[in-house]
Amino acid sequence: MGCFTFVKLMMVGFNLLVLLGGVTLVVMGIWVSVDGTSFLQLLGPFSNQGRQFINVGFFCIAIGGALMLLGFLGCCGAYKESKCLLLTFFSIILIIFIAEVAAAVVALAYSSFAEGILRAWATPALQEEYGSDPVVTKLWNTTMTELQCCGFTNYTDFLGSKFEKENGGGLPPSCCRNSTSCTPEEAERSSVQGCFEHILKDLKKHADIVGGIAAGIGLLEISAMIVSMYLYCHLDKRIT
């Protein structure tokens, strides 16, 4: 078996897997979109937020469709030895790769603004909506309980809030350790960290995994471009 034939078969096999992955995502997305409404009845007052579950289905369909297109172009281009399909496949992968690199650069450049953006949302929510809005209250209670944290920065996010005023100066129980009545003084002695610090620690803990996955995807895309361009350039030699 020649080198060209081996690369061709490898290209066909790889893109068949991509095509099957796309079909799986499309089927999953259709299932979520069609049957997802039945789950909303279980959410009661949170049904509006639950509609995001259906949006995930449409997202899966879109991503799956893109993967099916890529798999089809790569597989047919290699099998039929079509320069047009191979060049189209290469161009799409190149555009995706450039977009991913640009997104990574932007994410690194603006990562320092992440805390400010989150704080702009979290602080008003804790001051005005926590304790009165069931969605905001449930979200923050779940977060503070699971992460064992208090507020966004710390207990000071609740000082002067609507919740504190309605509870006679009391703060959420998550802000105090081993105390049934959580007061600002007790919260200060407890020194419970804010949720942002915990989230930041978790992100740093999993940064290597995320970086490894991103690097793997990047290498896979570069390999696909190299293989498709190799086949494209050697088709003329095959013909002659």
Image: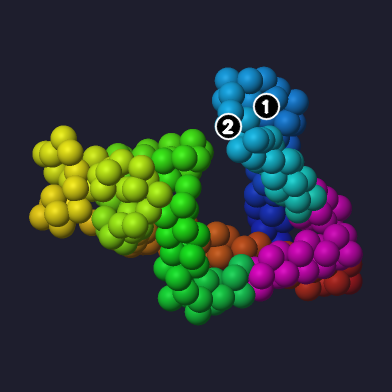
Colouring style: rainbow
Point out the tag, 1 or 2, that comes first from the N-terminus. Answer: 1
Q: Is residue 73 above or below residue 138?
A: below
Which residue lies most toward the bottom here?
109
Residue 26 in the image, given as x and y percentages of width and height: 73, 37
Corner quadrant of residue 89:
bottom right
Q: Mark 1 touching mark 2, by CB under 8 A?
A: no
- Secondary structure at numbered mark 2: helix
Residue type of the residue flagged with mark 1: Gly
Q: Is residue 65 visible?
A: yes
**Which element type, helix, strand or loop, lies under badge 1?**
loop
Position of 38 relative to 190 (above/below): above
Quarter of the image with the N terminus in it: bottom right
In this rendering, position of residue 84 left or right of residue 118: right
Q: Nearer the viewer, residue 49 or 105?
A: 49
Q: Which residue is mark 2?
A: 46
In percent of the image, x 37 and y 53: which residue is there? 161
* Quadrant of the drawing holding the C terminus: bottom right
| Magenta stretch: includes residue 72 | yes
Q: Which residue carries the number 1 mark?
A: 36
Which secondary structure type mostly characterizes the magenta part of the structure? helix
Q: Position of residue 67 (x, y in %)?
A: 72, 49
Going by the numbered disc 2, the residue's amino acid type is: Phe
Return the residue nearer the eye: 233 or 65. 65
Q: Where, by quadrant of the figure, is residue 94 drawn?
A: bottom right
Q: CA distance from mark 1 to mark 2?
A: 14 Å
Residue 75 belongs to the span the image colors magenta: yes
- Please give the range of residues in magenta: 71-99
Q: Which residue is depicted at the point 55% across and 59% down?
A: 217
Quarter holding residue 44:
top right
